Image (tube, grey):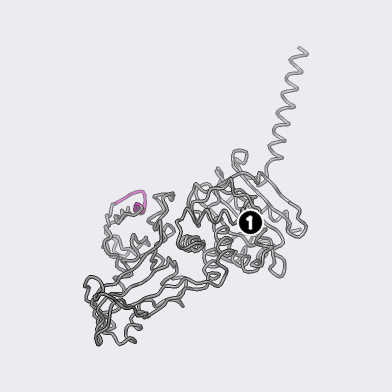
Amino acid sequence: MRRSFFNILLAGVIAVSTAFGAAAQAILGIDGEESTSIGIYIKDLRTGKVLTDHKSQLALTPASVMKAITTASALSITGPDRRFTTPVVLKGHAEGATWHGDIVVRSCADPTIESENFKSHRGFCDSIAAGIRRAGISKVTGRIVVEQTLSNPGPIAQWEIEDVAWPYGAGLFGMNWRDNTVTLYPATGETKPDVPGLDIELRRSASGNDLVRGVDSERLIVYARSTTDKKWAVRTTMPDPAAVFAAELTRTLKDKGIALGGASGASGESPKEKTVYTHRSPRFAEIMRSLMVRSDNLFAEGMLRAINPGASRKDVIKREKELWATRGINPKYTIINDGSGLTRANRLSARFIGDVLEWMAKSPQADTYSSFFPRAGKEGTLRGFLAKSNLKGSIALKTGSVSSVQAYAGYKLDSKGKPTHVVVILVNGFFCPRKQVREGAESLLINLFDK
């Protein structure tokens, strides 16, 4: 009897201890936290004291927080002032007002050409036509040739097939055009601008609207509640941006009174070249600020490849890892497949991200880099975060979210906008509503900093 009582008492003590231990481990206070993977790293940059370290070495899916690593790497290697440069030349020879040869566009994987997000840099086709006119040419016998040297172009193999047809799944090509997206009217098959070769199949679906297009495929399947609504439009991605650009340039040349013959190749044994226009993108710092605030995947992939324009994606990522290794930040247990974070198979730890953020905050590029991050309660994907707290505007974070993933990484700022703390919160595999994860992260930061 005494032994039985002792066993019951011991079991009760163990149960209470276990429950107390589980409660003590809770850091965000979300439902199902004991079964959720959470990595948190918060450090005071002024004192070097780590304020919060919760499983910071755990390798987790960072989602779009990957963009904070991409921009740190690109800014470190390229600097803020470099630009993408796309020259356009006439190749062949002139005979009066006729150019016997081609219009050659030497693309450099600039993701911003004719982008909605940099309207002041638009007018690519008009500028080419104006350059040809200034050269005294009114007829070109050849074709529009787009030279693309980017290796591994298009959507990344590790991206989900469900993402590729949607604007956020636009892949990076050697030639990018209008954010590599078009407006599609499924009921009529019309696209604006026109997309040569796009094969559209419209299917009725009671479950809702959806788009499916495979990697490197020109076949787009549109699932729609209504197959007859001619006003319904949706944004989708281009399988071949260079073809869309060439078609638009052809129309522009015609409108400007420049005839295009379409003959094959430049005539003559020693064709000459005449530059008619050179397009320069916004400064890299402007592009990185834009992609961080708007969480633009196409721009992020463009900045990743800018690290080493002539290399494969694999070699670019290798160089990126080597960069951080030489700075004393161990990338051994990281998995990087892209620059945007759309790949679910990426893995970064909160500590790795925090170390990168700390290095950048102490670097000569600190002010530029920290300016890329949207301010809590004010900008981009962080507009609603901490909006009703005293921390509004003093927390700058890149957010990341895909299915069952919510992530934050960035800085606590002082009154002058200088980073004082590194903040990294990664949550994977949660079972509660996403809103609860966001509120848990808000509470954690308010308890730490709003005193």
Residue 25, compared with residue 214, is above or below; it is above
Q: How many marks do you count on the picture? A: 1
Q: Nearer the viewer, residue 100 or 424?
A: 100
Are there few (<14), some (14-19), or many (20+) residues within 10 Å of tag 1? some
Residue 387, compared with residue 62, is above or below; it is below
In this image, 312 relative to 213: left or right?
A: right
Q: Position of residue 244 (x, y in %)?
A: 32, 67
Does residue 209 show up magenta in the picture? yes
Q: Position of residue 279 (x, y in %)?
A: 42, 76
Residue at image location 76% in from the left, 18% down from the top = 6
Amino acid type for the residue under numbered disc 1: Val
Q: Position of residue 257 (x, y in %)?
A: 26, 84
In this image, 415 relative to 208: left or right?
A: right
Residue at image location 63% in from the left, 56% down from the top = 356
Locate the N terminus and report the quarter of the image it occupies. top right
In this image, 112 relative to 66: left or right?
A: left
Residue 450, compared with residue 346, is above or below; it is below
Q: Position of residue 234 (x, y in %)?
A: 36, 61
Q: Nearer the viewer, residue 337 or 105?
A: 105
Q: Nearer the viewer, residue 230 or 370?
A: 370
Residue at image location 46% in from the left, 59% down from the top = 311
Does residue 251 show up magenta in the picture? no
Residue 451 location, quadrant: bottom right
Which residue, as the protein is rendered here, is positioned at the far top? 1
Q: Which residues are magenta?
A: 204-214
Residue at image location 73% in from the left, 20% down from the top = 8
Say which residue label 1 marks. Answer: 356
Q: Determine whether the residue tagged by mark 1 lies in a helix, strand or loop.
A: helix
